[in-house]
Image (cartoon, helix red, strand yellow):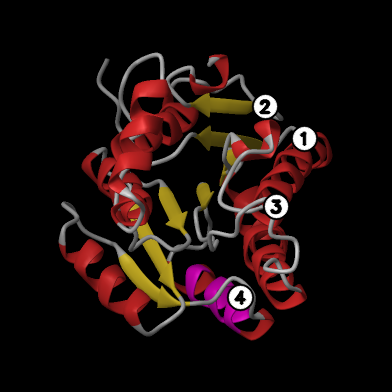
Amino acid sequence: MNIDLAEKVAVVTGGGGGIGSQICRLFAAAGARVVITHRGGEGEVRAEKALQSLVGRGHMLVRAAVDSAVDQKYLAEQLEKRYGKVDILVNNAGMTRFVAPEDLDGLDDEIIDTIFRVNWRGAFATIRTLEPLLRKSGDGLVVNISSIAGTTGIGSNIAYCASKSAMNTMTMALARSLAPLIRVVSVAPALVEGEYTDKLDPLWTEQQRQLNPLKRLTTADDVARAVFACATLLTYSTGCVIPVDGGRPLT
């Protein structure tokens, strides 16, 4: 099947990370014009590197933190000015920190508030801000990068699990309210191999790999392909959570 996304505009928040940059590359390779957002600092360095790796033309880099109303307004203005619409929005920006589930005191209010501000409120705020541009597409799509932690309750910390569960619920609610012009889906990977796992105990990481029925961890490319499928093949899907986990919840 020859998939051509020419003239499509795809916005990927936090697009400079491992998962985000691979999503950007797949969309660009299919002809889409890709917009990568970042929050500055190291994120800008990564985003610039990701931008340089894209084939094609018409791509753009925008500094726009998902938890800043000012930045979001600026993003919408830049997109309106340059493209006049948004066809695909991938809410990829997110954050977490490992806190053992039994360490309730370790999961303090500041960590909880930051996780929900970025992972849930940030995704919702981006959708809210870009909704008019998504409607102009006539066939808009929002893909929220969730996690199986949102359904299993097992993840880097309890607040992270809760934030992804909230994202899944938001996906279902918005799929109903934004239809028929905008579809909304969640893509929920298991533990993704990359920068995060590189910081973990190698023995624990290997244990997670062996516990997976397919005997490997999720890769950034696995996630990116699922997002790409939502935009190109699963065009009758909305309000659903698509697992990318190798069957990890089965064990």
Q: Earlier in the sequence, mark 3 or mark 4?
A: 4
Asked whether residue 75 is drawn in magenta, I would say: yes
Query: Residue 207 at x, y = what percent?
Result: 37, 31
Query: Residue 26 at x, y = what percent?
Result: 28, 41
Q: Nearer the viewer, mark 2 or mark 4?
A: 2
Q: Is residue 115 visible?
A: yes
Determine contact: label 2, label 1, CB under 8 Å. yes
Vertical order, 66 against 124 (above or below): below
Secondary structure of the residue carrying numbered label 3:
loop
Determine contact: label 3, label 4, CB under 8 Å. no
Q: Which residue is mark 4?
A: 72
Q: CA distance from mark 2 to mark 4?
A: 26 Å
Give the magenta part as a residue range: 71-79
Q: Which residue is mark 1?
A: 172
- The residue positioned 46% from the left and 26% from the top of the image is 245
- The residue positioned 68% from the left and 80% from the top of the image is 69
Q: CA distance from mark 2 to mark 3?
A: 31 Å
Secondary structure of the residue carrying numbered label 4:
helix
Secondary structure of the residue carrying numbered label 2:
loop
